């Protein structure tokens, strides 16, 4: 295993680092990255920016917004929310279990009552402190997760605006009610000490990689290309004439349909989902908006936890 600890608090830059070492400069072993960020809201690849982020609050409080390449929901990051990333070869299917198990073992060794919950969360005494996401590209898995250690939960609650349906399915009244900071369990341990301890627990004996000047220059260029700028952030926000959303086992899925003269000109999928929405959208574009045509185009579901039948009900009930 190779350990990278970054000294940059620009979240877009750190996401670009993940991309760089998984797609462009593969180091020949599992890479474990520990990083932190200045206040930022990170939204999933398929999420609608305006539906997930309190834009007035983030603007007033100088909170950045970045869209990542993986699916899943919106999260708030600050320097009290420690981020971790695994980069390694993988198959074609998204799988959270191996990475959640590794992190659970490491955290328990440090004295935290970590429990795996659902598809991609870690809880402590029933409250969430870690959400996880991943994408697979060119045979490489990028798995990244959050670890709330000493984050400002008040800001977290106000910066994001999850749907009331999602909150209701979890039987809770607000974001604040269902999250916690791990520092509750080790109040004497600072954030810096937690990061040091986590590095030892997750990557004891690992080779430490020091970024070169060339690495930093390329990562900065990738950050500009993939994660900075208005187009990268709002490019997936839908413009539509018909919107439908439902909650499935795999998460909340919304379809925004552009219909013109009975033709489905395009579909934008959004939500805290995982999978390849682009291929499905491409098959649907340009077909007649009839149950038969939609059924013929939707040969299978690209979203884990969402069946083909679920998609047909969502698109053409």
Image (cartoon, rainbow, N blue to C red):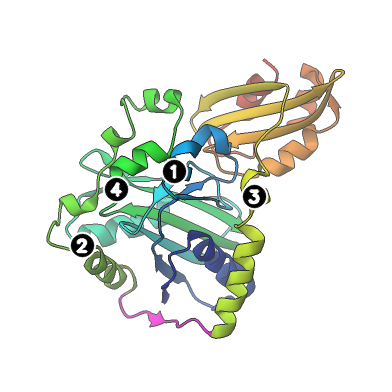
Compared with residue 311, is residue 201 higher up or lower down, i.e. above or below? below
Residue 198 image offset from top left, x and y in percent: 28, 66
Q: Does residue 30 belong to the magenta stretch?
A: no
The percent position of residue 187, horizontal first and vertical second, equals 13, 56
The label nearer to you, 2 versus 3, is 3
Answer left or right for 166 relative to 127: right
Mark 4 to mark 1 CA distance (whole Å): 16 Å
The residue range painted magenta reads 204-212
Q: Give the number of the mark in front: 1 or 3.
A: 1
Instruction: Give the residue number, with chain letter if any, for mark 1.
Output: 60
Main secondary-structure element of the magenta-colored stretch: loop
Q: Circle 2 is placed at which residue position?
A: 109
Residue 210 in magenta?
A: yes
User: Which label's residue is closer to the chain start, 2 or 4?
Assistant: 2
In the rendering, at what x and y percent does residue 46 appear? 60, 41
Task: Give the residue at x 57% y 68%.
Answer: 22
CA distance separating discs 4 and 3? 27 Å
Residue identifier under label 3: 230
Label 2 and label 4: CA atoms lie apart by 25 Å
Earlier along the polypeptide chain: callout 4 or callout 1?
1
Q: Earlier in the sequence, mark 2 or mark 3?
A: 2
Q: Disc count in the image? A: 4
Gap in Å between the C-alphas at discs 1 and 3?
Answer: 18 Å
In the rendered image of this protein, does residue 183 appear above or below residue 207?
Answer: above
Q: Position of residue 241 (x, y in %)?
A: 73, 22
Residue at 32% x, 68% y is 202
Q: Which of the marked residues, 1 or 2, is nearer the chain's N terminus? A: 1
Q: What residue is disc 4 on?
A: 152
């Amino acid at each position: 295993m190779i350990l990278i600890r970054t000294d940059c608090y620009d979240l877009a830059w750190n996401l670009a680092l993940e991309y760089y070492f998984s797609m462009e400069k593969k180091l020949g072993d599992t890479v474990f990255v520990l990083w932190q960020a200045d206040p930022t809201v990170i939204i999933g690849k398929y999420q609608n920016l305006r539906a997930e982020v309190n834009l007035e609050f983030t603007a007033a409080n100088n909170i950045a917004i970045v869209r990542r390449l993986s699916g899943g929901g919106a999260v708030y990051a600050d320097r009290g929310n420690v981020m971790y990333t695994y980069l390694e070869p993988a198959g074609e299917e998204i799988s959270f279990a191996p990475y959640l198990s590794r992190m659970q073992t490491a955290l328990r060794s440090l004295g935290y009552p970590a429990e795996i919950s659902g598809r991609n969360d870690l809880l402590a005494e029933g409250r969430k402190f870690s959400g996880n996401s991943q994408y697979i590209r060119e045979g490489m898995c990028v798995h990244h997760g959050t670890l709330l250690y000493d984050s400002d939960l008040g800001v977290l609650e106000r910066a994001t605006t999850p749907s009331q349906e999602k909150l209701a399915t979890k039987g809770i009244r607000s974001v604040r009610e269902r999250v916690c900071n791990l520092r509750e369990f080790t109040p004497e341990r600072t954030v810096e000490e937690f990061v040091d301890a986590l590095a030892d627990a997750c990557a004891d004996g690992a080779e430490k990689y020091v970024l070169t000047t060339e690495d930093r220059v390329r990562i900065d260029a990738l950050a500009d290309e993939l994660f900075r700028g208005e187009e990268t952030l709002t490019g997936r926000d839908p413009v539509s004439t018909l919107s439908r959303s439902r909650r499935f086992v795999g998460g909340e899925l919304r379809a925004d349909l552009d219909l013109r003269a009975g033709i489905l000109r395009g579909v934008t999928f959004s939500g805290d989902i995982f999978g390849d929405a682009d291929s499905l959208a491409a098959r649907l574009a340009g077909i007649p908006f009839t149950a038969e045509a939609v059924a013929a185009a939707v040969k299978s579901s690209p979203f884990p936890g969402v069946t083909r039948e679920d998609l047909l009900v969502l698109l053409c009930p």
